[in-house]
Image (cartoon, rainbow, N blue to C red):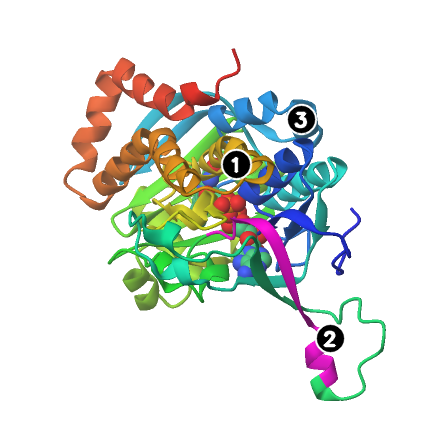
Amino acid sequence: MSNSHTIDAQDYDVAIIGAGIAGSMAGLLCSRAGLRTVLLERHRFPRHKVCGCCVNGRAFQLLKQAGLESGLRQLQPATTSSLAVRYRGRKLNVTMPTSFAVSRRAMDQWLVTEAIASGCQFIDEVTAAVQPIESDKIPRKTIASRMLDLPEERTLLLRFQHPHAANCPPKTDADRHASRQAKLSTKIVLVCDGLGHPSLHLLPSFTAEPVLGSRIGLGAVFPRTAADAWIQQSEVLMAVAPQGYAGVVEIENNQLNLAAAIDPSYLNKSNSPLDCLANIFRSAGVPMPQELRSATIKGTVPLTRSARRIAGHRLFLLGDSTGYVEPFTGEGMAWALTAATAAIPFVVSAIRNSWSDELVRGWQSSFHDITRTQQKICRLLSATLRHRWLLPPVMTTCQFFPSLTQHLVNRINRVPKALEII
Ligand SMILES: Cc1cc2nc3c(=O)[nH]c(=O)nc-3n(C[C@H](O)[C@H](O)[C@H](O)COP(=O)(O)OP(=O)(O)OC[C@H]3O[C@@H](n4cnc5c(N)ncnc54)[C@H](O)[C@@H]3O)c2cc1C
């Protein structure tokens, strides 16, 4: 992959902050639509990301609609077709539509490569921050921005980890500092920077504070050994305990991926994240995968939150930056791909026609329509998991009424009607 640390001298129509699923897909689709697009990522790529790594039916359909099926298959993802929930020795097996499991390291790097191939410029190791303008102070739903004198471009402050394309080498510390900073002006900004949208820290009206008691994520990738043979190859194993849950799935190259959502208070009481995970497996009544003991376990910020605004003047938020519900249903990537696909007509219209506040309202209502039902289901399931008395009857109901469970699973995996290709 040809990563770059420099900004081309050209003007950009669109700058995208964050090269996760939402950002790379948006980069790819914007470039295909003929927009001059730059994708900015703060980490060096490829990078690991805490995630359950399950590309569900909907995510797969959206990738397929974008002509990316064969590229995904070339990553040699594991195929999954069932979910095995374990809670205090109880078992619930749910049949799922065929899905794929692949590390986020491989998946995200591949999507970035596809975006570059479509003409998107990609710059990693650069942290972007959106500079505020007057209308950012106006609370959501107020339509007074027409009265303000609004700029025709947005400005981003960029901080490079490496001295960028400065032609003269820095001599002093001040030069060195300055050589790592730059400003970028662009007609549209897509904020795809994940949980808590750090690139909007200068725009308080967009905050996405975590809800009280929000769980945090833990994740690791490690080799599968003979001792893990009990974890079935096509199965997503979900070990559930009152203090959180941990999902394990096989991914490419005979590796296992673990992703967990844990009560922070429980984590604080445990000696280490590993101890905490060991207790969850023990409580669920299953062994802990063997090589997890030697794996690097990474954490996230609190997961459940929703952004106060998801659009502003020449600014659209996509993916986790709009907010997130706990990951039990493994849908975050599908939500990110859905949002990236649905946002493109708004971005194209903003570039080809003049900017209008209608685009903000349009994106808000479209986003609401495509995510509302899915997020409600996920919220409901997450709430169920927190009540230890509720989970056993729910597991029994699912067991005895498989058609009900299947209906729920199908809802989760279905592409929203508005995005279906006829
Ligand atoms: C424990 C756990 C398990 C999960 N399991 C699943 C699952 O099985 N299936 C599923 O579909 N989803 C799952 N998810 C959800 C999924 O990981 C997210 O919903 C998805 O990654 C969202 O994509 P995104 O592009 O919005 O954000 P991200 O993938 O988080 O990408 C954001 C990118 O922005 C970059 N960035 C941040 N700030 C800046 C900045 N200022 N400048 C430049 N770049 C910046 C980050 O480095 C990152 O690369 C899980 C999540 C967790 C926490």
The CA span between labels 1 and 2 is 33 Å
* Mark number displayed over residue 179: 2
* Mark number displayed over residue 340: 1
Task: Please give left or right for residue 73 compared with residue 269 in the image.
Answer: right
Residue 375 drawn in magenta = no
Is residue 104 among what the camera can see?
yes
Q: Percent from the top left, x then y, of residue 324? A: 37, 46
Q: Report if the CB atoms under discs 1 and 3 are less than 8 Å apart.
A: no
The first of marks 1 and 2 along the sequence is 2
The CA span between labels 3 and 2 is 41 Å
Q: What residue range appears in magenta?
A: 175-194
The first of marks 3 and 2 along the sequence is 3
For disc 3, the marked residue is: 73
Looking at the rendered structure, the kind of residue marked 1 is: Ala
Farthest-out residue, bottom: 172
Farthest-out residue, right: 168
